[in-house]
Image (cartoon, grey):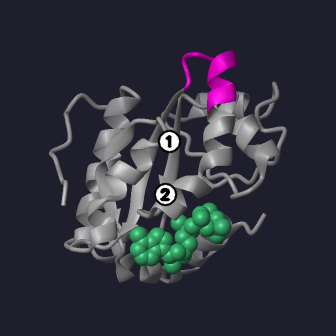
Amino acid sequence: MQGTVRTWGAVANEAGLQTATIVSMGADLHRPGQLPKLATGFDLVLIDCPPRHAEIQRAALMVADLAILPSGPSAHDAWAMGESVDLVQAAQRVRPELRAVVLITRKVPGTVIGASARAALTETGMPILRTELGFRVAYQEAPAAGMGVAQYAPKSEAAEEVRDLTTEVLSLVGLVKTKPRSRRK
Ligand SMILES: Nc1ncnc2c1ncn2[C@@H]1O[C@H](COP(=O)(O)OP(=O)(O)OP(=O)(O)O)[C@@H](O)[C@H]1O
Ligand SMILES: [Mg+2]
């Protein structure tokens, strides 16, 4: 594991900034006494899975309410998701209550590939979140400052779409009631 989130948390703490509680876990995170026990103290738990690590993805899918599969906008990105989609569908056979959605990210507005992203990703057979994240420098700059984009550049497009994403996801898991506004570009 690269531990990017932990490193980001360390940068944030050094800068005197607060973060969510960050815990690093392995492929046994779903076992009794692990994440399910820890999670009782929190309203919301985000599990960031490393790419191409089926063991950990499978463990996370055993405890998650909602799986979010981020994908770039191209057909190539959609094909690359095949393995994760298979894992999600296998988990859904064991746990029909598990929901899964695709998040379009790194989309460049005004490009042909950006415009066709939704169509390309429909082939995965998964529902696609209404919120889309653009390809924006704020996502690259914010972590170095130990921040998320909403804190780093609160008035930016990146911050706006991340707030929309938060609302949409919280509403999907039943933690807020408001519907997000449409941000299709
Ligand atoms: N929407 C975006 N716009 C611009 N740059 C982005 C965007 N999303 C990601 N990036 C860049 O790509 C890097 C990797 O992104 P991210 O951490 O989301 O990918 P990942 O697949 O989780 O990578 P890892 O293998 O490190 O876990 C980020 O640090 C950032 O620099
Ligand atoms: Mg990652």
Q: Is residue 142 above or below residue 134?
A: below
Q: How many numbered marks, from 0 up?
A: 2
Residue at image position (29%, 31%) is 176
Q: Please check the rendered image and state whether residue 97 is part of the magenta-colored stretch, yes or no.
A: yes
In the image, is 178 to the left or to the right of 163?
Answer: left
The label on residue 43 is none
Q: Residue at x 41, y 62 (%)?
A: 73
Query: CB atoms at circles 1 and 2 under 8 Å apart?
Result: yes
Q: In front here: 166 or 72?
A: 72
Please identify, in this view, whether the residue under mark 1 or under mark 2 is nearer the observer: 1
Name the dominant secondary structure of the magenta segment. Answer: helix
> Quadrant of residue 167 in the image?
top left
List the residue tagged with mark 2: 71
Magenta residue span: 89-98
Task: Give how far across and how far down residue 51 sits, in percent.
Answer: 69, 58
Nearest the eye: 51 or 20: 51
The outermost residue toward the left is 181
Q: Earlier in the sequence, mark 1 or mark 2?
A: 2
Does any atom of ligand 1 lie closer than 8 Å to the CB of label 1? no
On the image, the x and y values in percent for residue 15 come to 52, 80
Crowd rating for badge 1 (residues with CA inside 10 Å; few <14, some 14–19, many 20+) = some
Image location of residue 184, percent across then percent down: 19, 54
Q: Which structural element holds mark 2?
A: strand
Q: Amino acid at mark 1?
A: Thr
Residue 84 appears in the picture as rendered: yes
Residue type pointed to by label 2: Ser
Q: Secondary structure at mark 1?
A: loop
Residue 155 location (% of width, % of height): 19, 72
Residue corresponding to mark 1: 124
Q: How far is mark 1 from mark 2, CA to CA?
A: 11 Å
Q: In the image, is 8 to the left or to the right of 118?
A: right
Residue 168: quarter of image: top left
